[in-house]
């Protein structure tokens, strides 16, 4: 096989990805961009229009799609309820009395908001960061960086994030299996954020400062305001564990759904949210946009499988080339262009998983998923169009170019951590 013939499948895939990236860049919508990329890929690999439509319709009736749609929808409802009721703010106020270190206070509120998977969440913690930052005479750029970075420290290991949920749905593995390997990403986010951003933003001479934001210490209030989150997290992990041990025939997604429903009920009862709230949140544009993204991803995945794209790539080139592109380059590129985890997971993980199965490397699925997660999330964090980055820079009046350049070092450290982790997991 000559060089050009070997490159043809890759060129076709890159053409489809280019179409997706152009769509994201010109803001035609993430769902439509992924859908157009999938259709283009199917046509380039010989699927006819009727077959593409049939495959897409079948993708939207599968059990995994329906489960994931329910989970993502419930998470969006829970996040909206926490924000709209003011319970997330009350939780932050209740916890503030336990924080005495200026650096800890500065990062705590962005990190707490980071537990809620809502788009643009960094702007929600920005006022608290600004209060602390002005007291310590911090530059706007430093405030923006701290707020942006620590808002995202949990995304590689927090089970409520749609990117994590989509990953385990595509790989058909329990959430606990994945986050038990990706949790070092959270440690790396804290470490590199402290090393490159926090130390500079809060010099040692400022550490003696105390803030006036404290509302006292009351563990009962903390438990009450944090109840919905505890129900969602502990309930999801607990139900999943029980089903795995005592009811193997029941999909683990049911445990997550039950826990999320309980969490939504808890916050609605606590805040007397009735039918009006449900009607408003169910008609909210952001909810349906996210569900359309999930639908587009599953259509994309099934078109790719039906067209035999994985087999064509694996047969045309060595496994090293194909896997490197699928596990590092493509997730990073899509993450950087889209600025959202769901995009790189949905657009590239089906390809990666297909290659691994085709090459008989099923035992290496977890290490490669970890590598791709770190690569894609690095792209998301360094993306200049990441909505949290744009909103944060605007809020603090920070220069986008100078602020962005300071992300290169911590992002590089985070990616290097993922590469090291990949080799450690591969060697086991």
Image (spheres, rainbow, N blue to C red):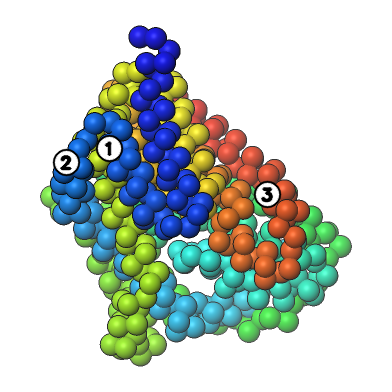
How many numbered markers are drawn? 3
Q: Residue at x 62, y 57 (%)?
A: 149
For residue 428, what is the image quadrant? top left
Query: Residue lying furthest right in this view?
Result: 205
N-term mark: 2 or 1 = 1
Q: In this view, does 142 lie to the left or right of 323?
A: right
For label 1, the SS is helix
Task: Quadrant for the N terminus, please.
Answer: top left
The residue under label 2 is: 51
- Distance (Cα) linking label 2 and label 1: 9 Å
Label 2 or label 3, whichever lies nearer to me, is 2
Q: Is mark 3 on a helix, strand or loop?
A: loop
Q: What is the crowding at mark 3: few (fewer than 14 residues within 10 Å), some, or many (at least 20)?
A: some
- Contact between marks 2 and 3 (CB within 8 A): the answer is no
Front in this rendered view, residue 278 or 257: 278
Query: In the depicted view, which residue is nearer to us: 137 or 11?
Result: 11
Q: In this view, does 6 lie above or below 241?
A: above
Q: Which residue lies furthest to the front in this view?
A: 49
Residue at image position (37%, 16%) is 5
The label on residue 42 is: 1
- Residue at the farthest top position: 1
Marks 2 and 3, the one that precedes in the sequence: 2
Can I make out residue 394 in this image?
Answer: yes
Q: Is residue 392 left or right of residue 311?
A: right
Callouts 2 and 1 close, C-beta under 8 Å:
yes
According to the image, label 3 marks what residue?
A: 407
Residue 370: tell me if it is visible.
Answer: no
Q: Residue at x 41, y 16 (%)?
A: 4
């Amino acid at each position: 096989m000559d060089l050009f013939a070997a490159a043809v499948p890759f060129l076709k895939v890159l053409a489809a990805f280019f179409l997706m990236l152009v769509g994201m860049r010109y803001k035609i919508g993430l769902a439509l961009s992924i859908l157009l990329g999938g259709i283009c890929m199917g046509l380039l690999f010989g699927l006819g229009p009727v077959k593409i439509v049939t495959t897409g319709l079948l993708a939207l009736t599968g059990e995994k799609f329906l489960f994931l749609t329910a989970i993502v929808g419930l998470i969006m409802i829970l996040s909206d309820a926490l924000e709209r009721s003011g319970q997330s703010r009350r939780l932050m106020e209740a916890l503030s009395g336990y924080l005495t270190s200026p650096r800890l206070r500065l990062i705590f509120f962005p990190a707490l908001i980071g537990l809620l998977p809502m788009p643009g969440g960094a702007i929600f913690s920005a006022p608290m960061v600004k209060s602390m930052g002005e007291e310590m005479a911090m530059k706007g750029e430093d405030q923006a960086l701290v707020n942006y970075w620590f808002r995202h420290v949990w995304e590689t290991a927090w089970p409520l994030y749609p990117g994590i949920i989509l990953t385990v749905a595509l790989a058909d593995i329990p959430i606990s299996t994945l986050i038990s390997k990706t949790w070092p990403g959270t440690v790396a986010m804290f470490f590199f954020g402290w090393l490159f951003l926090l130390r500079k933003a809060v010099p040692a001479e400022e550490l003696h400062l105390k803030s006036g934001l404290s509302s006292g210490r009351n563990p009962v209030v903390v438990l009450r305001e944090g109840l919905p989150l505890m129900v969602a997290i502990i309930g999801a992990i607990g139900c999943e564990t029980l089903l795995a041990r005592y009811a193997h025939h029941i999909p683990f997604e049911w445990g997550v759904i039950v826990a999320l429903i309980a969490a939504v009920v808890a916050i609605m009862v606590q805040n007397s949210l009735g039918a009006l709230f449900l009607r408003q949140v169910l008609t909210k544009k952001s909810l349906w946009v996210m569900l359309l993204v999930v639908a587009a991803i599953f259509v994309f995945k099934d078109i790719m499988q039906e067209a035999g794209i994985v087999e064509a790539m694996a047969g045309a080139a060595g496994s090293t080339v194909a896997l490197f592109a699928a596990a590092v380059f493509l997730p990073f590129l899509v993450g950087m262009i889209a600025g959202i985890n769901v995009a790189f997971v949905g657009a590239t993980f089906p390809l990666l998983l297909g290659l691994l199965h085709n090459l008989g490397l099923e035992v290496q699925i977890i290490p490669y998923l970890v590598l791709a997660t770190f690569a894609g999330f690095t792209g998301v964090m360094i993306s200049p169009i990441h909505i949290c980055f744009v909103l944060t820079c605007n809020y603090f009046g920070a220069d986008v170019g100078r602020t962005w350049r300071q992300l290169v070092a911590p992002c590089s450290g985070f990616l290097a951590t993922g590469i090291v982790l990949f080799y450690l997991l591969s060697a086991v």
